[in-house]
Image (cartoon, rainbow, N blue to C red):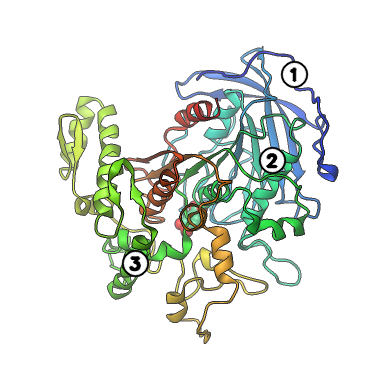
Amino acid sequence: IALSAQASGGTSASSSSDAGSLAFDPDAYTKLTTTVTDTAGDEHSVTYHFWKAITYVAKPLDAAYQSLNVSVPVEIDGTAVDASDAPILFANSVGGYMPSSVADATGVGAGGMGGGMGGGAPSGAPSASASASASAPGANGNTNATGGALSSNQLLALAAGYVVVEPGARGRTLKNSAGEYYGVAPAAIVDLKAAVRYLRANKGVVPGDTDRIVSAGTSAGGALSSLLGASGDSPLYDKYLEELGAADASDAIFATGAWCPITDLEHADASYEWNWGTNALGTGKQVDQAVSRTLRAQFAEYQAGLKLEGLNGFGTLNARNYDEYLVKQYLEPSATTYLAALSDTARETYLAANTFITWKNGRARFSWADFLTHVGARKKTVPAFDAFDLSAGENNEFGKGTVISRHFTAYSLKNDTTGLTAKRLDSDIPEVLRLMNPMYFLADKPNPGRSKHWWIRLGTKDSDTSLTVSANIAAAAHGLGDDVDHLYYWDQGHGANTDPGDFITWIAKVTG
Ligand code: DHB
C-alpha cells in the first residue's frame, strides 16, 4: 500500500480549542507499536499515539459508551509521519444495534470483538491483521462490542498514515435502575453525531483533518454510518444533542463507508419479502406466503413512490424491474469479477458446480430466479424486522422508556400476537423512524449537509436484509449527484469486507 503521510517531526498541537469542557488533551496519549500486514501480505511497523476512552459529551448518560478512542500514526516503517492534516477514519463497531464501548480498549491488536449476531466470523477474510488478534469488521451483534482489536479497515488506515477514531455508542439493551431503556433509537446516531461534533470542535488540536472525516461501519454499524453521512448537520437531532451537552460544532462528515447496512427499517419487512419471499428457511420450510405476498405488495408501493433512477441509465426502479436491475447492475458484474480472478481450473470447477451461470466472453450471466436458488435458505422469518411477537432486535431498537420492544410498522401492529390493543403506532414512532433512516435525508428531503462520497458494499449471499436496501441508498445518492462506489461481493455473506485495501485507496482518492 502507498504510505501517503509525509515525513515530519511529530504531532504538536498549535492552535487552541474552542471546545470548552470538551477540549482534547494533546498530551494524554500512550505510544504503541503494532505490525500491520497489508493486502499484498507485506508487514509494516506502525508506531502510533493512542488516546483512550475520551468522553465526547459534557453531560453523558453513560460514559462507558459515550466515549471515543483516537489512534494517530507517528512512525511507519521507521519513517516519521505527520498525520495532523490526514483524513480521519471514523470507524464504529456497532453490531445488532447493541451497545458499543471503547472503554476497555488497550490499543491495536489487543482485546477482542464481541460475539456474532449470525454466529461465528464474518465470511470476508480480513486481509489486514495486527500482530496480535485483529478481527474482521464486526457482524458482531448480540454481545457488547468492546473496542480493542482494530478491524482490517482501521489497521490499513493507520498504516496509510490516517488518523483512526473509534466512537462508542449507546445501544438498545442498556437499561437504567429505573428500568428505562436509554440506548434505544435514536441514541446510537445521536452519540455518533456527538462524537463527530467533539472532533470538529477540536479542529486543529485533535490530530487529523476534521473536514475530511470518513465514516465506516458494518451491518447495524453500516446503517448508522450511512445515516451519519446522509443526515449531516440536520437540525432534527439538535434537541437530543443539546440534552447530552454535545459540542456546538458541525456533525457533517466528508465521506461514508457502509458494509451491509441494515437500514430503512420501516420498509425492510416489505423489501425482504420482495427479495427473499419464496426462499425457504434453513429448516426447509417456507414462511407464511400470504403474509409474504402482502408485504411484497407494500414494497411495490414503496419503491414506486421513491421514484429512484437506477445507475447507468437503467430507468426508474420499481418492483417489476428491480430483479433485472440487481442482476445487470450488480450481481452479474460481481460474479464476473469473482470468476475472472480465478485460475482457469478453479473457474471451470466453480462453473461445473454452478451450471446456472453462463460464462461467455469473460462475462457471467444468469437469471434472478436461478440466483435466488443459488443463495438458498433465507436467514429470517416473516416479518423479518417488525416481528408480530415483538421478538426481533429491531423491536427493541424502537423500545421506549420502560417498554423494551415496540412495533414500528402499522402492518405488524395490526397483526400483533402479544395482546396489544392499540390501533395506531405510538405517536413518536414516525419521528424516530425519520431520525433513523438515511433514505429520509436522501430521497424524501435531500439534505444539503450530507456526505457527497459513498462507498457501499454487500455480500450477494447476505440475507440479513434485502439486496435492494443498499442499492436504493446508492441510487438515491447518485440521483442527487453524489459520487457513489457500490458493488456486491460474490458469494459472500453477512459482514463481508473483501476489498479493504481498495477502500483505503478510495479514501485517498476522494479526500486528496
Ligand atoms: C445486524 C444484523 C441483523 O440481521 C439485523 O437485523 C440488525 C443488525 C448486525 O449484524 O449488526
- Farthest right residue in view: 21
Residue ID for mark 3? 301
Would you say the beta carbon of the disc 2 residue lies within 8 angstroms of ligand 1? no
Q: CA distance from mark 2 to mark 3?
A: 46 Å
The image shows a total of numbered marks equal to 3
Residue 465 on image: x %, y %: 40, 56
Residue 169 on image: x %, y %: 66, 51
Looking at the rendered image, the disc whose residue lies closer to the viewer, 2 or 3, is 3
Looking at the rendered image, the disc whose residue lies closer to the viewer, 3 or 1, is 3
Would you say the beta carbon of the disc 3 residue lies within 8 angstroms of ligand 1? no
Residue ID for mark 1? 10
Image position of 110 with respect to 66: above or below? above
- For image coordinates 61% across by 29% down, the residue present is 87
435, 261: nearer the viewer:
435
Q: CA distance from mark 2 to mark 1?
A: 24 Å
Amino acid type, residue under disc 1 in the picture:
Gly
Residue ID for mark 2? 105
- For image coordinates 49% across by 50% down, the residue present is 219
Q: Quadrant of residue 328?
A: top left
Amino acid type, residue under disc 3 in the picture:
Glu
- For image coordinates 72% across by 50% down, the residue present is 66
Q: Please, what secondary structure does the residue beneath circle 2 have?
A: loop
Would you say the beta carbon of the disc 1 residue lies within 8 angstroms of ligand 1? no
Specify whether 242 is left or right of 303.
right
Residue 241 on image: x %, y %: 72, 55
Q: Please, what secondary structure does the residue beneath circle 3 have?
A: helix
Amino acid type, residue under disc 2 in the picture:
Ala
Work out whether mark 2 precedes mark 1 in sequence or the reverse, and give the earlier one.
1
Q: Quadrant of residue 154?
A: top right
Q: Is residue 466 visible?
A: yes
